[in-house]
Image (tube, rainbow, N blue to C red):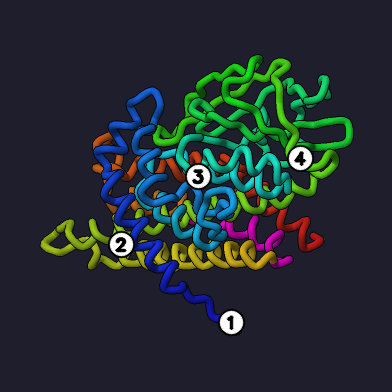
Amino acid sequence: MSLFEFSDEQRELRRVSRAYVTASFPESEVRRLMETAEGYDRGAWEKMARQLGLQGLIIPERYGGAGAGPVELAIVLEEMGRRLAPVPFLSTVLATVAILESGDEAAAADLLPPIADGECVATLAVAEDSGRWDAPAVRCRASPAGSGWVLRGTKSFVTDGHAADLLVIAARADNGIELFAVDGRAPGLRRTALTGFDPTRRLTELHLDGTPARLLGELGGGDAALARILDLVRVAVAAEQAGSAEFVLQMAVGYAKERVQFGRAIGSFQAVKHMCADALVDVESARSAAYYAAWAAADHSLELATVAPLARAFCSDTLLETAATNIQVHGGIAFTWEHPAHLYYRRAKSGAQLWGDSRAHRDVLATQIGL
């Protein structure tokens, strides 16, 4: 049996990331940014790139990044999830993954250096009105136009789409699904803000009406690229959800230790003990699943197609259940706007639907194992 251990460099990355996220995004700052039009601080975004280089973490060195892999990315996303970090990091990472997986060296050389420098916010747009993240659900059309392409259609539930300087869009051409890069200032692109359940994460609907686009990769290669991209999306989201779940558990346990009823800390009551113990088992299992999937991605293992949807479904369910347990432990105070418990529950509930729900991922898993 193999044993997974973090390297000294990975442990240092966690320490630095946690220190930065904790200092930069206390609850007061998260709430302040929730109320702004952008939902994040552009200056802080650029500062994060200059000081930590997180936007370029998985970007190869030849494009100005650090050349790290999926395990390192999972570490940072876990820390972001712990504090509901109000930055378009996950969205930009998903777009970066799509560009890299397209295999288009010329596009990577043009598009990735500004991301690594913090000059560009990016996002990945796959889902449409159905909310499904899979190739058969893509209806947005791509048509040749002169020496390039134009897109027509609508993309829904696009995270940080309102702020994106670069959009990577899955669209249907005559030969199947293809990936396209769209400049945020392109003509024919219109954005509509959506009202989401999670105030810490902005959602946008994109309207494309003859919008110029750049094909990523070779024509006919989009279906295969999208399949791996979706697996890597599952790994990234699972890591963020595992981080949120761990923090929520710590919140519940901390309150159970300090809240006194009938002369005793409520954590001494058997019912509360059982809730917290069950949550601990789930959270540790979720972290294990997330990191196993990240390892499979880093190792280019054939297991990725199986473990990615499994990790995503389990981490999503775990965060939702742990966030609900946290509210139970806190009691009535958790229902108030002033308490952070509801923010994590909102993130859990919203994340359970974005990028595909648990049932969809279990369907993917069932297909992979031949059920």
CA separation in Å, label 2 and label 3: 45 Å
Q: Please tell me which residue is depicted at 18% across the width and 56% down the height of the picture.
A: 259
Q: Which of marks 2 and 3 is nearer the N terminus?
A: 3
Q: Which residue does the numbered mark 1 point to in the structure image? A: 2
Q: Mark 2 points at which residue?
A: 272
Whole-number angstrom distance, CA of label 3 to CA of label 4: 29 Å
Span colored in magenta: 301-318
Q: Which of 49 and 170 is in front in this view?
A: 49
Does residue 314 lie above or below 104 as drawn? below
Q: Are marks 2 and 3 in contact (CB under 8 Å)?
A: no
Give, as a three-letter code, the residue at label 4.
Answer: Ala
Quarter that holds the C terminus: bottom right
Secondary element at image label 2:
helix
- Residue type, label 1: Ser
Asked if the magenta segment contains residue 70, the reply would be no
Check residue 135 in the rendering and tell me which mark sits there, or answer none: 4
Residue 97 image offset from top left, x and y in percent: 62, 48
Q: Is residue 316 magenta?
A: yes
Query: What residue is pinned by disc 3?
Result: 116
Q: How far apart, in angstroms, are the residues tagged by discs 4 and 1?
A: 35 Å
